[in-house]
């Protein structure tokens, strides 16, 4: 079983840097969010969006969809304020490491750094100083706080700028096996290290000191061949396990042979597929916070209990050896040696350390007063312990009432908009685009603006039936006309009335008129049909729901079964029933890999029965 990829590798970053080159010369448009964080650019090829997901996965795609009311975090606000319409002058990988830097034309000195290791980060710098970041941190040798001077993390061995002798020298002192040496010392990462060893015919557990120069040459050659392939002929590949993406590489890896895989047009597309199909993690944020509080309270209780016991024991010792302590305190007052270590303080007091607990005394005071003050210290620690125990006891009650879950943010590419997206639509089995209005206003708009002389018009003699326009193709015939009529019927009140079957008709465009007879009134969305109507009788009220590709864009469609079957391998059958749209959509959304809202938007008005899934040219499965 292959482990899920937890972060990008240096090889991934090498491939990604090449894919980011079209950003050079482009301009910053907008920035969004915190996780995912993204910057939208205007480039010669159109709008492109650089996204950082979980701080560790960066990719460039067409713009992503933004939920209404999405929060613009502090970093995104700073990018908008400082980099609006600023031009990208360079995108660089630092050595062969998981670090990318983006330089901007103005304000002068503005740089963005993506740290794609550790917990991940995006840092905005002004003349080398931190202006804003996704995460602030402060550790030895690497501080990211507002106003601090930024320095790149210590770079690893740069295999891109090294020859064979450098490669051999860097590896020779390693104490790990060959895979660990290549992964950490040379900086290839685990997967690439295993791929290099596989290509060179070296066992994973081999010790580096046991290898001869010929084997080292094979390892170096395999490493550089993979890098050369990524630079000159990348073949981005995503790997699946149980239907979801678990790995991706910029070129196919032999070590992942046997896995389901798919080649995509770019590594960015692979990364997007990977983060999009990962299972949504449910994080009980409040319970996690309470758990940390419990641990903190327990640590405090242990500290208070220890201090209480040590100070009480010390005070007891004073009365057990009254004269000995009196002499010791007098020596401390005079600055002389005492039977225990102590430290003199500027205010005349002394601090005695007993079992890790500092006890402050004033040596010149009466010994009974000293002992009493130490007992008071013990009592105070006892009171703190009691309060901590009470606070801990209250925590489970708060946990039970806490909110349950916070979902990992979902990401979706913004869809290409087609002119008919605001209407209902489907493709007939003969390839005709069939479009219907959603309400009276859109019925008027559809017919007045989009019904041309070569088209056909379909409708049903049922209240609420939409106007349907068939964009006629050469070679289309009765099947398309029947599907359009069935569409008009299913999206009328007939569906909610749950009748078994009913008729609908089609006519030519010149038979459709918005001009009523003298003295008649024509409401919005209605039309006068003059001349002969061509009926299809006993049309069934049954539809199919599927996700299908239309000109490279995935769309959810709900249409007559024969039409959907012609364009989708898998689909789901529905009829009038007693289930709500929301209930049906909740069941179908995970099966189609789309959102619940996408399904709700294509369903007819009314309630439903889900009669089961089906596949093209296969018997339907009843459920």
Image (spheres, rainbow, N blue to C red):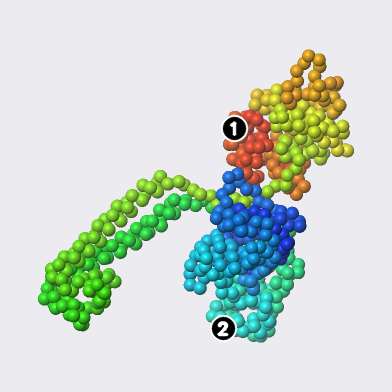
Query: Which quadrant would the C terminus be assigned to in this image?
Result: top right
Residue ranking furthest to the left: 323
- Position of 531 relative to 308 (above/below): above
Q: Residue at x 64, y 71 (%)?
A: 94
Q: Residues within 10 Å of mark 2 (few under 14, many from 20)?
A: few
Q: Is 582 placed left or right of 363 in the picture?
A: right
- Can you tell which quarter of the image residue 321 is in? bottom left
Residue ranking furthest to the top: 519
Q: Nearer the viewer, mark 2 or mark 1?
A: 2
Q: What separation in Å lies between label 2 and label 1 (alpha carbons)?
A: 69 Å
x and y, in percent, of residue 272 in the image = 65, 56
Cβ–Cβ under 8 Å for marks 2 and 1: no
x and y, in percent, of residue 440 in the image = 71, 28
x and y, in percent, of residue 119 in the image = 54, 63
Q: Is 385 placed left or right of 524 in the picture?
A: left
Tell me the tag on residue 173: 2
- Can you tell which quarter of the image residue 619 is in? top right
Q: Nearer the viewer, residue 78 or 413?
A: 78
- Provide the secondary structure element on which disc 2 rests: loop
Q: Is 539 placed left or right of 583 in the picture?
A: right
Q: Earlier in the sequence, mark 2 or mark 1?
A: 2
Q: Residue at x 62, y 71 (%)?
A: 97
- Position of 512 relative to 180 (above/below): above
Q: Nearer the viewer, residue 325 or 495?
A: 325
Tell me the tag on residue 579: 1
Q: Is residue 37 visible?
A: no
Q: Residue at x 62, y 65 (%)?
A: 110
């Amino acid at each position: 079983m292959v482990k899920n990829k937890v972060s990008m590798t240096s090889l991934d970053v090498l491939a990604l840097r090449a894919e980011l080159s079209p950003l050079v010369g482009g301009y910053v448009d907008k920035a969004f969010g915190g996780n995912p964080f993204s910057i939208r650019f205007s480039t010669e090829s159109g709008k492109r969006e650089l996204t950082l997901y979980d701080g560790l996965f960066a990719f460039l795609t067409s713009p992503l969809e933004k939920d209404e009311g999405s929060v613009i975090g502090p970093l995104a606000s700073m990018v908008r304020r400082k980099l609006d319409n600023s031009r990208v002058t360079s995108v660089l990988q630092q050595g062969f490491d998981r670090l990318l830097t983006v330089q901007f034309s103005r304000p002068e000195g503005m740089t963005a750094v993506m740290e794609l290791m550790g917990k991940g980060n995006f840092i905005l710098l002004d003349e080398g100083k931190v202006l804003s970041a996704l995460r602030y941190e402060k550790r030895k040798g690497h501080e990211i706080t507002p106003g601090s001077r930024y320095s790149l993390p210590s770079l690893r061995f740069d295999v891109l700028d090294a020859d064979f002798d450098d490669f051999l020298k860097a590896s020779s002192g390693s104490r790990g096996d060959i895979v660990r040496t290549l992964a950490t010392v040379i900086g290839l990462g685990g997967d690439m290290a295993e791929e290099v060893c596989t290509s060179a015919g070296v066992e994973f557990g081999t010790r580096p000191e046991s290898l001869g120069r010929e084997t080292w040459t094979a390892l170096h050659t395999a490493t550089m061949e993979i890098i050369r392939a990524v630079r000159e002929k990348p073949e981005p590949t995503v790997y699946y396990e149980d239907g979801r993406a678990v790995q991706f590489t910029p070129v196919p890896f032999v070590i992942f042979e046997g896995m389901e895989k798919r080649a995509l047009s770019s590594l960015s597309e692979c990364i997007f597929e990977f983060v999009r199909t990962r299972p949504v993690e449910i994080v009980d944020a409040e319970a996690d916070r309470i758990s940390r509080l419990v641990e903190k309270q327990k640590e405090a209780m242990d500290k208070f209990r220890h201090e209480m016991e040590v100070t009480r024991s010390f005070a007891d010792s004073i009365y057990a050896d009254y004269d000995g302590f009196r002499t010791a305190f007098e020596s401390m007052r005079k600055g002389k040696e005492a039977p225990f270590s102590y430290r003199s303080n500027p205010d005349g007091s002394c601090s005695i350390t007993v079992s890790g607990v500092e006890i402050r005394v004033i040596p010149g005071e009466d010994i009974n007063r000293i002992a009493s003050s130490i007992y008071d210290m013990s009592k105070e620690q006892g009171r703190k312990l009691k309060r901590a125990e009470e606070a801990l006891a209250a925590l489970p009650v708060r946990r039970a009432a806490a909110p349950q879950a916070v979902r990992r943010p979902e990401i979706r590419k913004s869809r290409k908009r087609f002119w008919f997206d605001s209407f209902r639509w489907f493709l007939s089995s003969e390839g005709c685009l069939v479009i219907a209005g959603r309400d009276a206003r859109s019925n008027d708009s559809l017919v007045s603006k989009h019904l041309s002389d070569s088209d056909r018009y379909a409708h049903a003699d049922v209240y609420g039936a939409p106007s349907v326009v068939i964009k006629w193709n050469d070679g289309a015939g009765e099947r398309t006309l029947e599907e359009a009529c069935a569409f008009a019927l299913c999206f009328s009140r007939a569906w909610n009335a749950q009748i078994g079957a009913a008729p609908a008709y089609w006519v030519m465009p010149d038979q459709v008129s918005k001009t009523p007879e003298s003295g008649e009134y024509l409401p919005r969305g209605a039309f006068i049909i003059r001349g002969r109507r061509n009926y299809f009788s006993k049309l069934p009220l049954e539809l199919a729901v599927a996700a299908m590709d239309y000109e490279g864009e995935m769309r959810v469609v709900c249409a007559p079964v024969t039409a959907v079957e012609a364009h989708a391998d898998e689909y789901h059958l529905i009829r009038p029933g007693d289930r709500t749209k929301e209930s049906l959509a909740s069941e179908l959304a995970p099966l189609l890999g789309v959102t619940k809202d996408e399904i709700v938007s294509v369903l007819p008005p009314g309630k439903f029965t889900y009669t089961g899934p089906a596949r093209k040219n296969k018997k339907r499965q009843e459920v």
